[in-house]
Amino acid sequence: MYSDHARTSLNQVEEFMFELLQQGSGVASSAATYHVSAGGARIRARLALHAGRALGRPETESVAIAAACELLHNASLVHDDLQDRDEMRRGQIAVWRKYGDAMAICVGDLLLSAAYGALGAAGASTARLSVRMHRRIAEVIHGQCADLALQHGANTSLENYERVASGKSAPLLVLPLELALTLAGKEESVAAAAAAGSLFAIGYQVADDLQDAVQDAAHQELNIVSVLAASGEAQPRQRARELAILRFRQAHAAALRLPSGSGELLSTQATQRADELARELEPA
């Protein structure tokens, strides 16, 4: 449950994102607004707001980094849907399917640019934050390229699967915590945040793969079930579920080590997901 304060802060993030996307007119702005309006869990925004509050940062800073992280995430979704040819996103037609491939590229670019615009509201620390944000974006791009290289039935090891899963998802999960820690002068804790984010990202990707196993197999897309089956695992789905639970539990423990309770929301999210998967393993 959100507190009233948390809801107010999240509403400020929403308003700020739409303000940035609507600077100027045209189809790209309309399409970007269409995409963002579909909602979503806003987990990255919530992580930034929670961490900023826990670390005693001003609300304006927390809203700025929350909006930046959420805009980046949405840029990645628009481009991912285009690459994967996924026709639906959050219950509505994906941007590329509704507006065309070229416009989807423009929309992703607009969301990316807006993220840097949002970061500008963080004040004097903007330059340092921008450098950190670029590094995480570069990591995501490298991770996505590694994922694309393993499609079409390519074989890989569990170790490499986890590396790719972390590489394409963890950086934008770590970023909200990293920016809040940087603003608070706690850069020495960024490595711990990265470890927690990596574990959570692996657990999340494994859980997502379990839901998409049949579809991914039909399209020869990378999936933990096929990776484990190819390695000789007799019960790949059960093993995958156990792996996701383990990584979520590890993420929970790692996030709790962050200073001033700044990782508590991530730890809670990890525990909830682990518990949901654990119930699926229980005999009826």
Image: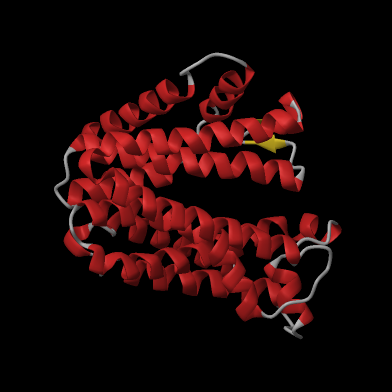
Which of these two is toward me, 60 or 279?
60
Using the image as rendered, state which of residue 223 and residue 176 is in the foreground.
176
Relative placement, left or right, of 255 versus 161 is left
Query: Of residues 47 and 208, which is closer to you in this image?
Result: 47
> What residue is at 21 percent from the left and 59 percent from the top?
261
Question: Where is residue 235 shown, x and y percent of the image?
Answer: 71, 78
Q: Residue at x 59, y 65 (%)?
A: 165
Report the residue at 69% width, 80% height from top. 157
Residue 186 in the figure: left or right of residue 246: left
Q: Is residue 121 left or right of residue 139?
A: left
> Nearest the camera: 5 or 29?
29
Above or below 276: residue 98: above
How many marks are shown on the rendered structure? Answer: 0
Residue 85 x/y as whole percent: 77, 43
Spot the residue most to the front. Answer: 127
Furthest-top residue in this view: 25
Which image quarter holds the C terminus?
Answer: bottom right
Query: Is residue 252 at all visible to an observer of this figure?
Result: yes
Furthest residue to the left? Answer: 56
- Which colour scheme appears in the figure? secondary structure
Left or right: residue 2 versus residue 231 is left
- Residue 42 visible in the displayed image: no
Q: Residue at x 37, y 34 (%)?
A: 118
**Above or below 31: residue 244:** below
Residue 179: horizontal and vertical position, in percent? 31, 52
Residue 1 x, y percent position in the rendering: 32, 41
